[in-house]
Structure formats: structure tokens, C-alpha cells
Image (cartoon, rainbow, N blue to C red):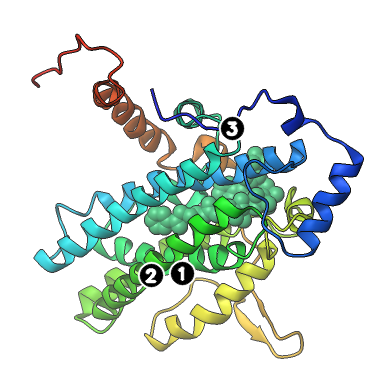
Amino acid sequence: MYGSAYIDPNDKFANEDNPELMAEFEARIERGEKIEPKDWMPTEYRKQLIRMIEQHAHSEIIGALPEGTWITRAPGFRRKLALMAKVQDEVGHAQLLYSAAETLGKSREDMINDLINGKSKYSNIFNYPALTWADSAVIAWLVDAGAIINQVANSKGSYGPYCRALDRICAEESFHLKYGHDNVVYLATGTKTQRQMVQEALTRWWPPLMHFFGPSDKISVHTEKLMKWKVKMATNDDMRQQFLNMYVPKIWDLGLVIPDPLLRKNEETGKWDYTEPDWEEFKRVINGDGPCNKERLAVRRTAEEKGRWVRAALANADAQYVAPLS
Ligand code: BYC
């Protein structure tokens, strides 16, 4: 139904682990070479990449939903156009990432099924509602900022198709960031009601933003292996620190209050001190029990069902097929 991957996942050679091949593979990574789809790679590297790229792709299509609900209610035509373009970009990012994951041997159909059946994860942050226009502004500024920090780092990684997709995504995200910043500045320098609205949105999104970079390094499961293979180029805590370093001063400049009484730059360590995020809430949300998980997956299931005839028509799977009129 979907375009299929060109690599054969049943190819024994492609999946078999072998010490000599492993040594050469690790030497290539050490030299900073890119691994390409038809190159030998260890099974675990392939599995980890599929897991991470697939989750990233799901995050992009699910991530289009909270902001997407504001397209019809955007304040003014220019903002509506800009938001439509942004949401369309996010869905395009998912397409790039699904294609990158397919090169590793998992079909797009399997990935989508795993998403809608709740087997695959996607970013915690999109399981919260965008209650006001200011929420969409905070997402576009700060969630995209967090995403850029993660993606710029990982675009220097070892798997060619993922790195090339990230390069292209980052170029588009940098426009999203400017769009989001412009919206937040407008509200933060506006009327009392507008300032209050953006403050409330920031207060709502701060805890999920702190979760966005993943669990602290002390409890992260995959970081060590992924960094060894240069799939991940910075730890979760390093990315969180980089985000705080770049964006806390900008948020404070706007007169906004970050809802964390412990947040401050520690002059001795050169790092930001902050309240430890609630990792129990994080676990609940990423395992399907956040405020909007059910709603988000229901939308994807509906899209999947309603889009079936389009994919069938495109694949020319059934020449007799007649599209429903309503
Ligand atoms: N949310 O060992 P760890 C966007 C899971 S979209 C959910 O540290 P890892 C945008 C993790 O999967 C871009 N789950 O994991 C779109 C693992 O569980 P499993 C979003 C998370 O992989 C529209 C477990 O926790 N960015 O920006 O080493 C509009 C242990 O974690 C999260 C990406 O997807 C999370 N936040 O590192 C606007 C980036 N964090 O799989 C904006 C790609 C952790 O063992 N992903 N988990 O069951 C990554 O870079 C890495 O996967 C992470 C986590 C840094 C997120």
C-alpha cells in the first residue's frame, strides 16, 4: 500500500553480525564516514536507528496536530498562511524521515501501524493540548528551538540518510523558530491580556519542554550505545543545558516568568541548575497516558482509514475501485 523499502530486510548478509565486519564498521564511524543503506551494519545499529528515526517521524506528524487546530482560528490572514505553511512543513518532515527509516528495512505501512496501535512512541510533548493561540506560539518558538538543538547535533551523525534528512529539516525549522519568536514577542509586548495569555502558555509548556530532551543521563537507556555509534551526538542532559543556555535569557528578556524557582545559571559549574523534571509523569505520557494521547492517535487512525482509497488509487491496486463521493 505504501512505497516499499528497496533494501531486503531478509538479506542474511545485511543482518548477520560478524566481528571483522564490526571492527571495520566501528573504524569507519571513528573516521567520521557516513554509513549508507547498502553498507554492512550490525543488527543492533539498524534496530536502534529504525526505533529513533521512526519515533522522530511519528513526532512530526503527531506534532502537526496541536498547532494544526489553530489554522482555522489564527488571528489574521498572514498568520493563518504562515501557520498553514509550518504545519505542512512538519508533515513533509515526517515524509523525509519515514523514507530514511525505510532504507533500513521497515516498511512505511508497518511504521504507521505501529504508531496507530500504540506500539511505537513519539515525542512526549505533543500529548498536551494547545489551549490558546499563545500555546501555538510557544510551540513554534520553543519546541522548534529544542528540536533544532537536537537535530543540528545529530545531523553530524553516522547514518547518511538520517543526517541528510535532518539537514533539510533544520533549514525549514529555522523559519519556524523565527515565526514562533515573532508571535511570542508580539504577545509578550502586547496588551495585559495578551501578556497574561503567553505567560500562561509558557507555564503550561515548560514541564513538557524539560522532558522533551529525554530522561536525565543517569536514567537514559540508549544514550551510551547511540553515542558510541554516533547516532546521537549529544547526551539528553547536554541538549537540555544547551537549550537553557540559549533560551532562558531570551525568555527572561521578554519579562516572562519560567515556572521553576530553582532555575539559575550556576557560576561554579557553568551549568544551569533546575528542578528535576517529574520523570514519573514523563513515563506515563510516553507510555500512552498523557492528556491527549488517545485523541492524537484517534486522529491518525481516522486519517489512515480515510486516506486508504487515495493510496489504493495511487498504487493502482484495484483498477475497479471507485472513490466514495462523500
Ligand atoms: N518523548 O534512552 P533514552 C518537532 C523514550 S518533532 C517520547 O534517553 P534515546 C516538531 C525513548 O524512546 C521532533 N519518548 O532514549 C514537530 C526510550 O524509550 P524506548 C522531535 C522519549 O533515544 C511538529 C526511553 O524514553 N524530536 O520538533 O537515547 C511541530 C529512554 O530514553 C522521549 C525527535 O524525535 C521523548 N521526549 O534519546 C513542532 C528527536 N525521550 O524507545 C515541532 C529524535 C526519550 O526504549 N529522537 N524517550 O521504548 C532523539 O533524539 C532521541 O530519541 C531522544 C531520546 C533524545 C528523544
Q: Residue furthest bottom?
A: 267
Residue located at (35% from left, 33% from top): 300
Helix, strand, or loop for circle 2? helix
Q: Which marked residue is nearer to the observer: mark 3 or mark 2?
A: 3
Reading the image, the residue beneath label 3 is 7
Q: Position of residue 229 (x, y in %)?
A: 76, 54
Q: Residue furthest top?
A: 320
Q: Is mark 2 within 8 Å of ligand 1?
A: no
Mark 2 vs 1: CB contact within 8 A: yes
Give the number of the disc on residue 141.
2
Asked which quadrant contains residue 75, the reply is: bottom left
Residue located at (64% from left, 85% from top): 265
Q: Residue furthest right?
A: 19
Q: CA distance from mark 3 to mark 2?
A: 38 Å
Reading the image, the residue beneath label 1 is 145
Asked which quadrant contains residue 253, the reply is: bottom left
Give the number of the disc on residue 204.
none
Q: CA distance from mark 2 to mark 1?
A: 6 Å
The answer to whether 34 is drawn above or below residue 312 in the figure is below
Helix, strand, or loop for circle 1? helix
Give 166 or 182, whichever is nearer the viewer: 166
Taking the image as shown, residue 244 lies to the left or right of residue 64, namely right
Helix, strand, or loop for circle 3? loop
Give 232 or 144, whichever is nearer the viewer: 232
